[in-house]
Amino acid sequence: MAKVSSDDLGSESIGRLLIKQAVPASIGILVMSLNILVDTIFVGNWIGSIAIAAINVVLPVSFFIAALGMAIGIGGSSIISRALGAENKHKALKTFGNQISLTLLVTITMVAFGLYFADGLIPAFGGKGAIFKPAKIYYTIVLYGVPFLALCMMGNTVIRAEGKPKFAMIAMIIPSVGNLLMDYVFIYIFDWGMEGAAWATTGGYLLCFGYIFYFFLSKNSELKIKSVDFRLDLPILKEIGSLGFVTLSRQAVTSITYLLMNNILFDLGGESMVAVYAIIGRMLMFALFPVFGVTQGFLPIAGYNYGAQKYERVRESINTAITYAAIVATVVFVGLMVFPAEITGLFLSSRADMSAEEMASNIFVLENTPAAMRWVFAATPIIAIQLIGAAYFQAVGKAVPALLLTLTRQGFFFIPLILILPIYLGELGVWLSFPIADTLSTIVTGYFLRREVKTSLRIDAAA
């Protein structure tokens, strides 16, 4: 693997640089998303559709705790990118050390609370009826591995901040491949059911942690921290917190969304309706991987060049990132509009020994998911503006607008819509909430991003 330096972020052409950053990020997200997708297919075919619903109930809790690591990672990585751009290596090292200490402290505490209140949290997130028992099995085992996942998410963003996207890509591929192999062994061969699915997921987290730990000890990393860097520093913690709070708020709202969606859909159609949303949720993670890849690739480029006061390069990176993301989002949109039934069928078991209840659930899911999927992804071609716009403010350290724009889609628009529209439109109101929220949030983000480019990113501003 060729030697890469963070200095390249400020000198190489934006188009080529964005491809070099976004392609590995996209591949990593693709493999991770494929892992989630195939894992769900395995669970649906080898355990049953209720098991898919059970995992969907657990995800918002485990992902929220893991998102603490991502929040600390993205908040700190914004500081690291700008510090490296300004040639302030001491601040970059101190920030990284504080990220590690803070991630361990916060996530271990949250896992302890999560395990203690398990019986109350699982039903609150939709784990009711037949879903509760498999959900609790999965929840308990997976939560033990969540601190390692949080460290992986934190470390991965720091690797990108150093300008080394290929290593970050490998860090995402290793646990995904490991998880799928362990799925086959634990579920299919050993017949461990939900326990097997949970241990395979946790094993993937451990593999990822091992690789990232190796990376920072090796000569590939520029960040060689000392024991003194682990000592918590209040000004750095405040800066990490203000920027990381954006990511954490987004995940918190996502978890609240899962809670509301699972409960609303359970009331509308029972366990099978929750399974419909679980499949669509997997596609939201999987289908948009190239768009998220462009967003991940954009972050260190914008942060580094903003820190170096190369504002023309920041403007160019915004325009290029939006263009690339919009193109791939449109391709995804076309595929989902044409093949929703075929995609849904992948998740459902065709075993001859299915019970009548499971067969009825599969028929319901197959009949209801395609139309819902089309509505959910109806505004996909325009979401690039919203994603890149919110990411820009986070990359350059502007926490307040980053927070507000990040919360715009789900917090300000989507949650009110799913509370109101189903009252009048039933199930259709739930699915219509997605494109309406996407459209409104894109309009708002586009307005503020355009104003920012005209004021703070003037070519003469760096003079």
Image (cartoon, rainbow, N blue to C red):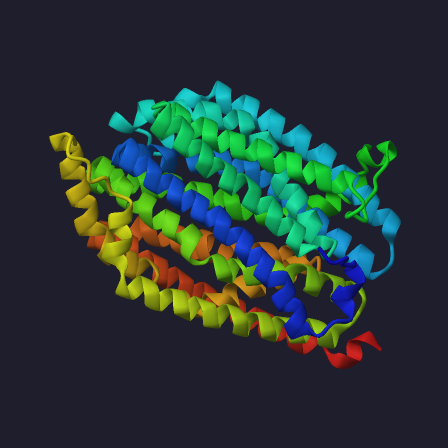
Q: Residue at x 36, y 66 (%)?
A: 333
List the single residue furthest toward the left. 356
Point out the image quarter for the N terminus.
bottom right
Asked if residue 81 shows in the view, the reply is yes
In-front residue for pair 420/209 = 209
Quadrant of the rendered image containing residue 332: bottom left
Q: Is residue 254 above or below residue 298?
A: above
Q: Residue at x 65, y 60 (%)?
A: 299
Q: Is residue 392 left or right of residue 286?
A: right
Q: Is residue 368 left or right of residue 165?
A: left
Q: Residue 78 location, x and y as percent?
A: 71, 54
In-front residue for pair 430/424 = 430
List the single residue furthest toward the top. 116
Asked if residue 426 shows in the view, the reply is no
Q: Residue 27 location, x and y as percent?
A: 53, 56
Q: Is residue 56 above or below residue 10?
A: above
Q: Is residue 107 left or right of residue 234?
A: left
- Circle count: 0
Point out the image quarter for the C terminus.
bottom right
Q: Is residue 173 left or right of residue 84?
A: left
Q: Residue at x 69, y 64 (%)?
A: 301
Q: Residue 242 location, x and y as percent?
A: 68, 48
Quadrant of the rendered image containing residue 215: top right
Q: Residue 52 location, x and y as percent?
A: 32, 37
